[in-house]
Image (cartoon, rainbow, N blue to C red):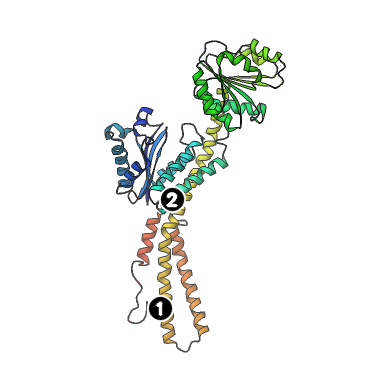
Amino acid sequence: MDVVVIGISHQTAPVEFREKLDFSKHAKESYLSKLMEQQSVSSGLVLSTCNRVEVYAAGQSETALLNDAEKFLQQFHNVNPTEVRHFFYSKTNREAVKHLFRVASSLDSLVIGEPQILGQVKEAYFDARSMTPIDPFFERLVQKAFSVAKRVRTETKIAEQSVSVSHTAIELAEKIFGELSHCRVLMVGAGEMVEIASRSLVQRGVKRILFANRTYEHSVELAQSYGGLPILLPQMDEYLVEADMVFVSTSAPFYLITREKVEAVLSKGKQSPMFFIDISVPRNVDPSIHELEEIYLYNIDDLKGIVDANLQMRKEEAEKAETIIEAEVARFYQGVEKLEVAPLIRNLQDKYEVVLRQEMERIQSRFSGLTAQELLVLEKSISSAIRKVLNDPILFLKGEGNPRSSLERAELLRQIFRLDHKVKEEEDGSV
């Protein structure tokens, strides 16, 4: 069984082209059924994310699989082959297996170690399995990819440190406050950074989030999405006193939070520390508030310094992960080869089981005076001798210490032991 992958990713194609091949806007039944209509494909899946579109397919001919997978991508999206071909990459067999393991383990992601991709691979697999039966080879391959991804996450620190500015800010807040569920948070601004931070806070059990924005409608939308309370931007000052954490991300060209405002909050007897995250450019929080007691302030440069250090750590851990993947690819193919040669081993053993039966029948007919106990001892002796004789050929077939491929070894054994021929008795009774 051969396996191939063909696709595009953030490494090979710009986003405007990846959009042309995006499958997410199509019904899964429509594109998966088209894939399985390809003559060479016995099993396959389609992985479509914002950063990649890949088709994995298994069948009997890698050349036919590559041709059919490329044809499927071009015809389904109605794109010109000459327009798209130079964006594609393709890999076959061991390289395709390695690529799937790297993708599932997030080593091929835009952000190394991000956790979403494994869930996306699993979803693509479950979609494919719901449409058509998966053959044993492809099933074994995908399940192995899942276990490899788990091993990478367990044995390396590839996903331990955040490489998102918003997530890094929340992790810093946890170091200051410990448990965040009791914290009261004021979000000033809108946009992706605010949304990511809000989602992360809700996941940590934060129940009190205030949203202040120049456009009140945006505050309402965010509050509805994350279970918070919308407020008008001019109301921000009066709510500062109850905030433990203030997250600011706006395009205002001046300080929205001044030292005087923070000093006024402290003068009201606020006891708990305050944590300010200012990711605005230009800055919206007066940097001098960091001098005040129990006030912690981090700006975009502070956070990016931490993110860069975390990214470097992930790259170092990725080297360990690559070693794991190389070993797992070899282990996968060792398992596949054992499956491939298992039927031939059974054929070999069955053939000589027939030889044993025939020899015992011949001995019994020639030496009628042998007792049942004597015949049993004789049968066990012959059976033991056959097993010893077959031991070396079986080890050869399993590939122990042999550089030949499983197919080459199987063909040699098939010819030497004439496994395509049935055992028959000659006229003189010999086998």
Q: From the viewer's side, name the closer residue of 99 and 319.
A: 99
Distance from the alpha carbon under mark 1 to that under mark 2: 41 Å
> Does residue 200 appear left or right of residue 350 in this picture?
right
Asked whether 390 or 300 is in front, the reply is: 300
Can I make out residue 164 in this image?
A: no
Quadrant position of the C terminus in the picture: bottom left
Residue 22 point in image, percent of width and height: 37, 34
Q: Nearer the viewer, residue 293 or 375?
A: 293
Q: Is residue 265 above or below residue 403?
A: above
Residue 278 drawn at (x, y percent):
57, 18
Label 1 with label 2: CB-CB less than 8 Å: no
**What residue sits 33% from the left and 44% below the top?**
35
| Residue to which mark 1 is pinned | 358
Instruction: Give me the disc on residue 139.
Output: 2
Residue at image point 54% right, 39% down: 320
Q: Secondary structure at mark 2?
A: helix
Apparent side of residue 395 relative to residue 229 in the rendered image (left or right): left
> Identity of the amino acid at label 2?
Glu
Q: Relative to 313, say whether 430 is above or below.
A: below
Q: Quadrant of residue 98?
A: top left
